[in-house]
Amino acid sequence: MSADALATAVIAAAGSGDRLGAGGPKAFVEVAGKPLLAWSLAALEAADSIGSIVVAAPPGNEEEVLAAAGSAAVVPGGASRSESVANALKEVGSELVLVHDAARPLAPSRLFDAVVSELAADSDCDAVVAAAPVADTLKRALAGRVIETVPRSELWAVQTPQAFRAKALREALDAEAETLAKATDDASLIEAAGGVVRIFGWDEPNLKVTTPADLAIAEALLARPSAFAR
């Protein structure tokens, strides 16, 4: 971390791990010799743009996360991902905040720095999100029948990290629990509130670990750091 850091980082780490079949919180699943959470913590600690870190932990596992989190603050996660981020925001005093999923262990420090720098440089923007251009052909279907092929030229697969102006994110998260539960990412709440969200194109590995197959891919990449630039 740098003395000239611009942002506080929030790690959303309260996922249950049910789809992964982890038998416990996803953040504690081991990948390439470390808990999943540890990879994001290490990358954020090495980022020049990050001054402090807050981890939204699986409810009931705060002490275990605290023991592994080093200098990071730990708060209990909520019933939804967005509620977890809202809980963590109570510990954020900086103007800018970066939100990252612990389930994306491949994100490097330079990606965190890039999205924060992009946001800091654009005063008209409320958020900057990492995203990859969609490569697959997309089709809309109903009851298994294709209705149309969706043009992909303007479509992006959104990832984390996502950098926000903390004030705008707090306002967007001040919503009903039902609305927060339906949000697939925090940037969508900014969009719904009329805010400006920009894309930061990223086509290097940054998969979200959701299934056992994802875990195997992440394990292979993290075990061979020369295979991609961390």
Image (cartoon, rainbow, N blue to C red):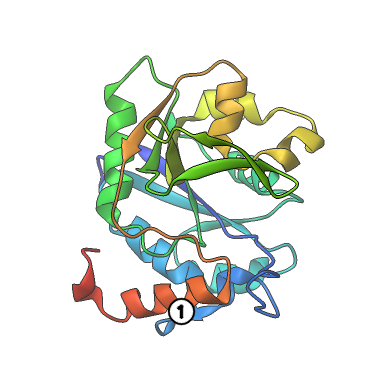
Q: Is residue 152 above or below residue 58?
A: above
Task: Pinpoint residue 88: horizontal percent, then vertical percent.
Answer: 60, 46
From the viewer's side, name the closer residue of 79 and 204.
Answer: 204
Residue 5, visible in the rendered structure: no
Query: Which residue occupies 70% across, 50% down?
Result: 144
Q: Residue furthest bottom?
A: 33
Q: Is residue 93 left or right of residue 154?
A: right
Query: Which residue occupies 25% across, 63% down?
Result: 230
From the viewer's side, name the closer residue of 150 and 80.
Answer: 150
Helix, strand or loop for disc 1: helix
Q: Quadrant of residue 142?
A: top right
Q: Is residue 60 above or below residue 82?
A: below
Q: Is residue 112 left or right of residue 31?
A: left
Going by the numbered disc 1, the residue's amino acid type is Ala
Q: Is residue 222 left or right of residue 29?
A: left
Task: Pinpoint residue 9: horizontal percent, then vertical percent.
Answer: 44, 47
Residue 102, visible in the rendered structure: yes
Query: Which residue occupies 26% across, 24% down?
Result: 121
Q: Quadrant of residue 194?
A: top right
Task: Pinpoint residue 56: horizontal percent, then vertical percent.
Answer: 61, 55
Query: Which residue occupies 40% across, 30% down?
Result: 154
Task: Pinpoint residue 157: horizontal percent, then vertical percent.
Answer: 45, 44
Give the residue pinned by disc 1. Answer: 216
